[in-house]
Image: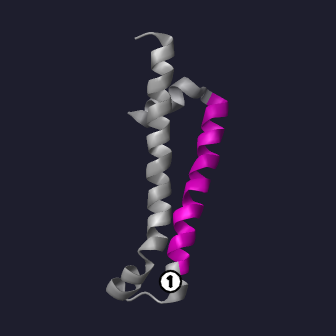
């Protein structure tokens, strides 16, 4: 595969991943009425669920950044993809 085609594949995968993540985080808010009813959550618990969905990936990004600095992008991304 040529380098220019490879870049488009990587861009497509990255775009899909970002979109899926956004749908997950925003989907919790869109389903909040059903989550409150079905899981019997109060507004505080629902707020904590929304916060956790956005806060926990930030902690993962700190770890990923540290690993990228130490071991290089190819190795960390390759192991993460596997």
Q: Main secondary structure of the magenta part?
A: helix
Reply yes or no: does residue 52 show up in magenta. Answer: yes
Which residues are drawn in magenta? 47-70
Q: Residue 45: image x %, image y %? A: 50, 83
Q: Quadrant of the N terminus?
A: top left
Quick one: label 1, few (<14), some, or many (20+) residues within 10 Å?
few
Residue at position x 41%, y 83% in the image: 33
Residue at position x 50%, y 31% in the image: 11
Position above or below: 27 against 36: above
Position above or below: 18 against 52: above
Q: Residue 9: image x %, image y %? A: 44, 26
Q: Nearer the viewer, residue 59 or 5?
A: 5
Q: Residue 22: image x %, image y %? A: 50, 55
Q: Residue 73: image x %, image y %? A: 58, 27
Reply yes or no: does residue 58 show up in magenta. Answer: yes
Q: Which residue is mark 1?
A: 45
Give residue 27's quadrant in the image.
Answer: bottom left
Give left or right: position of 16 versus 61: left
């Amino acid at each position: 595969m040529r380098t220019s085609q490879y870049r488009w594949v990587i861009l497509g995968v990255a775009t899909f991943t970002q979109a899926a993540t956004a749908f997950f985080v925003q989907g919790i808010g869109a389903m909040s009425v059903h989550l409150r009813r079905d899981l019997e959550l109060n507004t505080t618990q629902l707020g904590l669920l929304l916060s956790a969905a956005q806060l926990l990936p930030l902690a993962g990004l700190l770890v990923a950044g540290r690993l990228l600095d130490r071991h290089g992008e190819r190795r960390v991304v390759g192991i993460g993809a596997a």
